Image: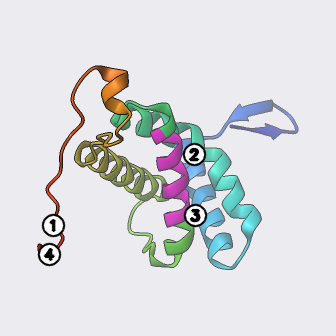
Amino acid sequence: MATTCMVCGPRPISAAESVHDDMALVHACKSGDVGAFEELVKRYDRKLFRIAQHVTQNREDAQDVVQEAFLKVFRNLSQFREDSQFSTWLVRITINQSLMKVRKAHRKKEVCIDQDSQAETGQRALEFADWAPNP
């Protein structure tokens, strides 16, 4: 991102200016300015996507994670205490969401129990015990 000086022309924004600008946007968001939140999303969506994709190793999961992270930030923005930079808080939420997505994916294993699966794979279909009361 760059700012334009009337004399010098465009110049990059320093890290300190970016942090200050983030806080101004956060304060505007807390006051109900949706446009300020949109600006924060534009500013950080690529970075968060790269982080999420690195953790999840999956493009679609990373997209879901970023969307969930921004939704969580939007809902909980009033809880941001401003003890740290906004970007640090945002990245931490994204990493946590990514790790939760990975954990859920590892726990979730799908098995087809369809009768037609025997014909397609050449293997026997799984048999399950009937837990219904026996007369």
Q: Report the residue at 30% width, 29% height from top.
A: 118
Secondary structure of the residue carrying numbered label 2: helix
Looking at the image, is mark 4 or mark 3 earlier in the sequence?
3
Q: Residue furthest front?
A: 135
Kindly identify which residue carries mark 3. 23
Kindly identify which residue carries mark 1. 131
Q: Report the residue at 21% width, 30% height from top.
A: 124
- Comparing 86 with 32, the one in front is 32
> How far apart are the alpha carbons under marks 3 and 1?
58 Å
Secondary structure of the residue carrying numbered label 4: loop
Q: Nearer the viewer, mark 2 or mark 4?
A: 4
Amino acid type indicated by mark 3: Met
Q: Nearer the viewer, mark 2 or mark 3?
A: 2
Residue 5 found in image quarter: top right
Which quarter of the rendering shows the C terminus?
bottom left
Span shown in magenta: 61-72
> How far apart are the alpha carbons under marks 4 and 1?
6 Å
Would you place residue 4 above or below residue 86 in this image? above
Residue neighbourhood size for the residue with mark 2, other residues' Cα within 10 Å, grouped as few (<14), some (14–19), many (≥20): some
